[in-house]
Amino acid sequence: MVTETLSLWRDAERCYRVVTARDPRFDGQFIMAVRTTGIYCRPSCPASTPKAQNVRFFPTSAAAQANGFRACRRCLPDAVPGSPDWNVRADLAARAMRLISDGTVEREGVPGLARRLGYSERQLGRVLTAELGAGPLALARAHRAHSARLLIEVSELPLTDVAFAAGFSSVRQFNETIREVFATTPSQLRASAASRRGRLGDVSGTRLSLRLPFRPPFDASGLLSFFADNAVPGVEEVTSESYARTLRLAHGTGVVRLTPLPDHVRCELVLTDLRDLGSAVSRVRRLLDLDADPAAVTRVLGADPVLAPVVAAVPGIRVPGAVDGEELLLRALLDGPPPDGDEVPGEWGVTRLFPTAAQVAAALPNHAGVVAVAEGKLDVHVGRDAAELRAELLAFVAPSTADYVVMRVLGAPDVLLADDPAVRRGAARLGIAPDSLGEQSRAWTPWCSYAGMYLRRAAAQPCSPGQSTAWATMT
């Protein structure tokens, strides 16, 4: 299953069938480039399907750009869900892509990216070019171009400010990149977006409203319920329709409100520094697991006779992620509510940041795990290798807590929290002996994290003698 996903872009015949069908489920999983026009598109582009001999397929938009293709202005191939490969895969390329999306290259350069991944710059460049068709600078350039397009189209910032907010080192570099990637100038992009402003979003000062795409179906109510059960007062605010929280970002702070809608999630952002836009969007996408491939999950879990009724009843379930690895680990380490963090201007019911590790350690100086985080002995970020991170965590937390942190921070899709009381209750209600979950999970690979979410959902439902039939009619 995983091998099939990883090699999809290399299978030209299958990719062309997807393009012919204009199947939106594959948007973000590969890029189609047309030799005769010099443009690249998402698989579901509504334009006329080119002849098979005229197309090439790439794993990323950066690879298409590196080969001289420019983005289609009709289908906007950068405005799609990201590839689910970056969570399914645990290799160097996937870890690097998560860090690049978080803005690491803009903040720390390629040396910083390589250092976080534990590789030399030369090794890293060689692996990324072989796996993704582009090196770290080209991948970061594609990320900057996407951030710049968002700011150009949904803000009224001066274009000079947009250039530096998106991470470009000069206005000249910004102008050249926009022309090369989108075959137009920044001012022309802004003019063409003006008529669509109501659809794309709006901005006032540092307030932006964006549309975050996902692959349907999307179980938004399940995520909102999870966040409500675990919300930290002042840091998070959950209603029946939205989730709001504060963000601690590289250049400042932010507040976000996420409102799920039928075909996208409305993302309202207030940022103190617009350089954090790309990172903020990347983090909330991970939080909501918006790059998941629900069809792939359903194919595997829906084939299990025990899970099938649950899967059919709750399509598109997601695994909650995290906006900050350090915060999630601290929340897992603490037995009670955290000490108060710094205050921020109130928005949507949230008024303060989650405290830093140093602030928590000051309140709990004898907590070995908290002190380890504060002293940098535990570095939890999206570019970590899962096995290495888990091994480090086991010096301070139980295996179940280590698995929980790995699953949520790294978006690891194949972690079953077999010791979670809710997971065990759900298993029992579905007729699975809790002590046999380890053996049972072999049939759920590589989607054990999602299976665990289905078991948690089963535990939350009233138990009845006809449990299987009850699932078929659950709303």
Image: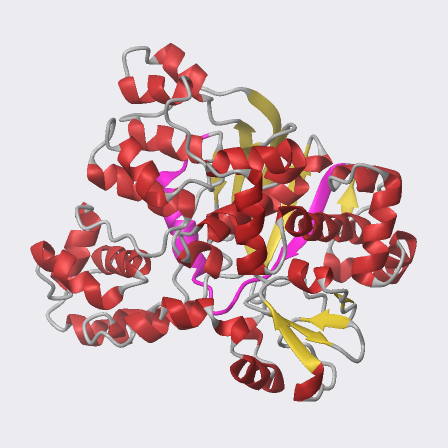
Give the x, y percent position of residue 15: 56, 79
Tell me where residue 58 sits by quadrant: bottom right
Identity of the residue drawn at 28% across and 18% down: 368
Vertical relation: 269 (above or below) 290:
above
Give the x, y percent position of residue 286: 49, 49
The reply to whether the magenta stretch includes residue 286 is no
Vertical relation: 391 (above or below) 22:
above
Identity of the residue drawn at 51% across and 53% down: 241
The quadrant the N terminus occupies is bottom left
Side of 354 where 153 appears, left or right: right
Tell me where residue 18 sits by quadrant: bottom right
Side of 20 where 406 appears, left or right: left
Side of 298 where 67 appears, left or right: right
Q: In this picture, which residue range is highlighted in magenta?
A: 206-233
The reply to whether the magenta stretch includes residue 226 is yes
Identity of the residue drawn at 47% across and 60% down: 85
